[in-house]
Structure formats: structure tokens, C-alpha cells
Amino acid sequence: MIIVIIGAQWGDEGKGKVVDLLADRFDIVSRYQGGHNAGHSVYVGDRAFVLRLLPSGIIHEDKTCVLGNGMVIDPKAFFEEIDQIAEQGVEVSPERLKVSSRAHLIMPYHRALDHTSEERLGNEKIGTTLRGIGPAYEDKAGRRGIRVADAMSPEILKLRIERNLEEANRIIVLYGTQPLRADEILAEMTPLVERLRPFVCETSHFLAEARKAKKKILLEGAQATLLDVDHGTYPYVTSSNPTAGGASVGAGIPPHHITGVLGIVRTYATRVGEGPFPTEMLDTEEPIAHLIRERGNEYGSVTKRPRRCGWFDAVATRYAAELNGFDSIALTKLDVLDELDEIKVCVGYTINGERVDTFPAVSHDLRQIEPIYETLPGWKSDTLGITEFDRLPVNAQRYVRFLSEHVGVEIGLISTGPERDQTIILKDSVMEGWFTN
Ligand code: GDP
Ligand code: IMO
Ligand code: MG
């Protein structure tokens, strides 16, 4: 069994919590795209983990985790994270963490270029995490990137750093920043790369063998559908493919071997960074946005930036369901809406007075969208930690059913708090099958 987990909105839907929950029933958890721009929070008892590069399954010490070929890996961030979770009592050895030889490395000049690129864009900036993600993927597509396998040869590493830095420095100095030095980068990278060596693996082969041995594999998406470089709100996107097709490419798994796709959807929407957000709460709704931000702790887990908050967008989520082929949805953060009198759901769009039923490609159009809302009554009572659907207030049940009908996919899991056991698994759902098989 191979299941892919995908964010359906603009990220931070609660993928980490759901992966951690499901990981118990799986043998291997693999990331397939992105890098340490992700921030997946997992709470286990009194321990709080924020996973950036490592799959959220790493907390389970009997699971094997994989960093797939579609990822971009900052070696420094990789070991900082390993050391951080070791401090929290989770040991990570090369036996249970495999890094693809074909993944690309993020170098210090990628970080510098992320800064200069944002500076150049000024008001049009993307609002990236400044981790060097975009420039590393640019080098990959430009066929000059440094892959993990390349870095294992000291000569190739030196040659590529020198050659790539020459070009990077031309841009860096244009912005009045000190040029970087190849010898310093090499001195920083060499010990990190040596420490990385035992983790390096032909991960697609490893996963293929695992599948043959009937091992269960969970593919953990980072970022989300609307941040996908092909399908998202371009150019306000990340530089990888978090969508389901990206899982096949980025983990090196044949598409027909994937058994199911799980969408992670919040009961409302958020966005960090710039870019269109049709259902963003208006200034007059700031008290509600404030309430949600505080109750939902909507601050970037990596950058600590306050997240922009908005109403549930059924058009965008339906688009995500169609693109990814969601078999089931995990609906997170129901409890965050507990205090609201009324809850709005966007069920359609109009642009210049015309009804639009598909998600527009052009970000200019997306900015002009007027959402068509339906307003549902709130439930005004505590749902935190409820574990059975029938125990939810009637209006909360209604809200969940309304979202499922408008997105056209079953809701198989409802999350009622950040902890593992604050979860409802819906009976007779596809999701229940994944938990019990
Ligand atoms: P990810 O990037 O998709 O893994 O999501 P993040 O970890 O960045 O953000 C989700 C935040 O919501 C984390 O702090 C989670 O612990 C928290 N969270 C997840 N599910 C729930 C829930 O059902 N209720 C509440 N209150 N918090 C949740
Ligand atoms: P998780 O996995 C939310 C956003 C950034 C920026 C855009 C491009 O925790 O859901 P990048 O640094 O990737 O080039 O930035 O994408 N972004 C995220 N937003 N959650 C994330 O990850 C994100 N990763 C990147 O804010 O708008
Ligand atoms: Mg996150």
C-alpha cells in the first residue's frame, strides 16, 4: 500500500499531525519534494516537534524515513534538525534514514540568491521563506545543480561550487552584497558532506524493493496544491510539485503503484507570503481573523510570520481534489472555529460580474474575484478533543457535511486538536480502511 498525503490549500493544513497519526500503520515515510521551507508540527504528549526536512514519521523510532530525489537538501539544516530531535530524545541513524543520491543540495549561494531575487522584485516579491529553495530548483532545471551523488566526489564538489559561484557572485555583488568565497563554502560543506555519506541511498530502488516486500509506504507532501509551480497561483508559488503527480516523480515510484491519495484540508484557509487569496478575511473581519490566528496559532512554524486568514474556499478545494484525485479528506482544526457565531464558505466566484466555476490561471484574475458566500451558523461550544462524530454539536456536523458535499470527496478524518488522540475517524470511510489495513 502506498498512500500520498497532500496539502489542499496554501500549506500548513496540518499535514504533520496526520502523517504522524498514520505513520503508526505504515513502515516507511518518504518526502518527495521541497526542502526546509516546510514546517510540520507534531505534538506527542509534552513534546513538540517541528519537522522541516525530515519526514514526520521520524518520531516513530521503528519507522524508516526517506528523503526523495525530488527534494532540495541543505546539508547544514539537515544535521541541525537531526541534532535538534536527538536532543528531544529521538535518535536518527543511517539505518532508518535514507537520502536520495539524486536529490539536489542547497548551497549558501542559493540562500543569497533567494534574498537578491526577492529584493529585485520589490512590491512584486513572492514572500519566500528565504531558504534558497527556488534558486536550488533553478539550478536543477538549468542542469548545473549539485546532487547528493555528485557531492560525494570531492573533485566534482569543488569544481561545481567554483563554477556555479562565479555566476552567482555576479548577481550577488550587483545588490551590494559581499561576494561569497568558494574556499569558505567548500570548507563548510566538506565535513557536512562526509557526515551525509552513510545516509546516501538509491532511494527509488529501496522503495521499489520495500513495495515488493509488501511494506506500507506513506508519501508526505510538503507545501500544498495552490503553491504547486504548475497548478498553483503562479508566480506566487514554491518551485516544486507538491501535487500527486509530483509524488511519483519525486519519490521515483511508478504512478500506478500509488494506492490512494489523501487531501489535508483545514476548516478555513491561510496563506503565508504574498499572492492572491480570494477568501482572505477583509479588514472589517479582522477581529475574526485575529481570533482564528490566536486560537489556531497561525504563525509560520519556520519563519514565525503571521499567517493571512480566510474563509473556506470550496472552489479552490474542489480544484485541488480534481487535480490530485483525493480518495479521502482529513479535515483539520475544527476546534479553532468553536467560538464563531457564523461561518462563511465560498461556494463560487464572480469576476467582473461573470460567474466562474474553475480556478483561474492568472493571478490578476484571482485578485479580482468576488467570492460567493453561503453563511452557516456556528456551534458555539467546545469541540476540542472530541473523538466521535456523533458527539459533535449538530451545527459542526452540518458544517463538515456541507464542506464534503461542496468539495465532492468524503471527509474520513476530522481533527479536533493538535494531539494524536484529538481525532475522529469516520466509520466506513476509505480513510478507516487505511488505518485498519
Ligand atoms: P503542516 O505544515 O501542514 O504540517 O501544518 P503546520 O504544522 O505548519 O501547522 C498546523 C498547526 O496546527 C500545527 O501547529 C498543528 O499542531 C496544529 N494543528 C493540527 N491539527 C489541529 C487541530 O485539529 N486543531 C488545532 N487547534 N490545531 C491543530
Ligand atoms: P508546509 O509544508 C506555507 C510559501 C512561502 C512563499 C512561497 C514560496 O509547512 O505547508 P519558497 O521558500 O518555497 O520559495 O516560498 O511558498 N511556502 C509555504 N507556505 N507552508 C509551507 O510549507 C510553505 N513552504 C513555502 O511562504 O509564499
Ligand atoms: Mg507548515
Image: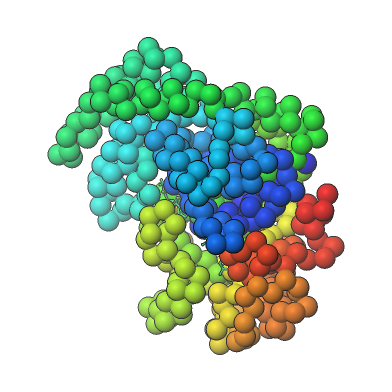
At 14% from the left edge and 39% from the top edge, which residue is drawn? Answer: 176
The image quadrant of residue 276 is bottom left
Residue 349, horizontal then vertical, whole percent: 55, 69
| For residue 164, side relative to residue 392 (left or right) | left
Q: Residue furthest left?
A: 176
> What is the total number of numbered labels drawn onto the structure image?
0
Is residue 169 placed above or below 355 in the rendered structure?
above
Q: Residue at x 37, y 40 (%)?
A: 132
* Residue at (65% x, 37% y) in the render: 64
Which residue is pictured at 71% across the width and 36% down the height? 255
Which one is nearer the viewer's eye here, 159 or 51?
Answer: 51
Q: In this view, does 327 lie to the left or right of 155?
A: right
Residue 17 vs residue 130, the one in the foreground: 17
Tell me the quadrant of the picture where the N terminus can be found: top right
Coordinates of residue 351 in the picture (x, y in percent): 49, 67
Rendered image coloring scheme: rainbow
Q: In this orientation, which residue lies closer to the viewer: 21 or 68?
A: 21
Q: Please identify the quarter of the rendering in which residue 274 is found.
A: bottom left
Q: In the figure, 375 relative to 165: above or below?
A: below
Q: Where is residue 258 in the image (x, y as percent from the top left)?
A: 73, 40
Is residue 375 visible in the rendered image? The answer is: no
Q: Quick one: 325 or 200, which is closer to the camera?
A: 200
User: Toward which corner of the image does residue 398 lie, by quadrant?
Assistant: bottom right
Q: Does 62 sit left or right of 89 as displayed?
A: right
Q: Is residue 188 above or below residue 270?
A: above
On the image, the x and y values in percent for residue 250 come to 58, 35
Residue at the extreme top: 155
Q: Is residue 21 visible?
A: yes
- Left or right side of 256 for 235: left
